[in-house]
Amino acid sequence: MSLNFEQQVIQRSQDIPVVVDFWAPWCGPCRVLGPVIEQLAAEQAGRWELIKLNTEEEPELAQQYQIRGIPNVKLFYKGKVKAEFAGALPKRSIEQWLDEHIPDTRKKVLDELLAAIEADPSPAKVKELGEFVAQHPDYTEAAFELAKWLVYSEPEKAVALLQPIRMGGKWFDQAEDLRVLATFMQADFDPSSKVGEAMGKAQEAVRQGALETGIQQVIEAIQCDKSFMGDLPRKLGIAFFRIWGPQDPLTKNYRWRFDMALY
């Protein structure tokens, strides 16, 4: 069946991004790349579409789009080439390329939801974000943002949302910080020891939204026993500061005290 490039790529890309895999049957790397990109197209169906273009059968199109080596993959959107790569990249690299270049209309909706929550952090607004995540289970950024809002009140749900985020992924470092925080929020601290008492007070303060008291108690716990529960006080303090960011007043006021307690 002949490829109608104008209809299947140029016109179709007005509605949805179209990824074109320029390949040939004799090309070894093409046979490596083909199944990988086809699997991704199936996994991300509805986000973009894949067209396989055999350069042996369509030499004019290969020349038009300056294909000098294969495999060559080009992303078309609104009728234009927006990005491309050459060679048989591994799946994770292709996923990162797609995440970077595929226009995602969901991003605008997510930004609006997050802005609404910042203005009114009520359970109803967080529920709206949860409904959005349920509708788009493959949207990692949305799941990560929901986990940030749930980690204090529903740490088990936050951990479940972070489950798909693996080492090497875009959100891995931030997800690790949230996992530390979830471990802290779920822990049962024994108040019979000074460090356990301090961590219990920190946990209760954080539950109440008193983050300054929380970090004060974490620092006190470090001074008692920095290695407690597998270095949890140290890991927790670092996670807090990274989540808050360097310009947050709590980071500015307490990072140096935290560092002094460690050393």
Image (cartoon, helix red, strand yellow):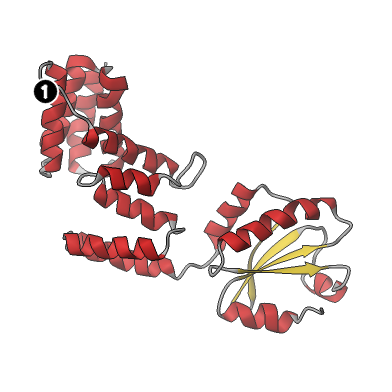
Image quarter (top left, top right, bottom left or bottom right) of the C terminus: top left
What x and y, as percent, mark residue 181? 27, 37
As drawn, 190 above or below 154 = above
Give the percent coordinates (x, y) of residue 98.
Answer: 57, 59
User: Residue 205 is drawn in which quadrant?
Assistant: top left
Helix, strand or loop under label 1 = helix
Q: Quadrant of the N terminus?
A: bottom right
The three-letter amino acid code for the residue at tag 1 is Glu
Residue 150 visible from this viewpoint: yes
Q: Give the residue at mark 1.
A: 197
**Residue 86 visible here:** no
Residue 31 drawn above or below residue 235: below
Q: Which of 189 and 244 is in front in this view?
A: 189
Question: Percent from the top left, x then y, of residue 108?
Answer: 38, 69
Judge left or right: residue 40 versus residue 161: right
Q: Which of 72 and 255 is in front in this view?
A: 72
In the picture shown, does residue 199 fall above or below 106? Answer: above
Q: Residue at x 30, y 28 (%)?
A: 235
Count the marks. Answer: 1
Rendering quarter of residue 228: top left
The residue at 68%/60% (across/down) is: 38
Q: Is residue 180 above or below residue 55?
A: above
Neighbour class for label 1 at 10 Å: few (<14), some, many (≥20)? some
Residue 212 % position (x, y): 13, 37
- Residue at point 78%, 78% (across, down): 3
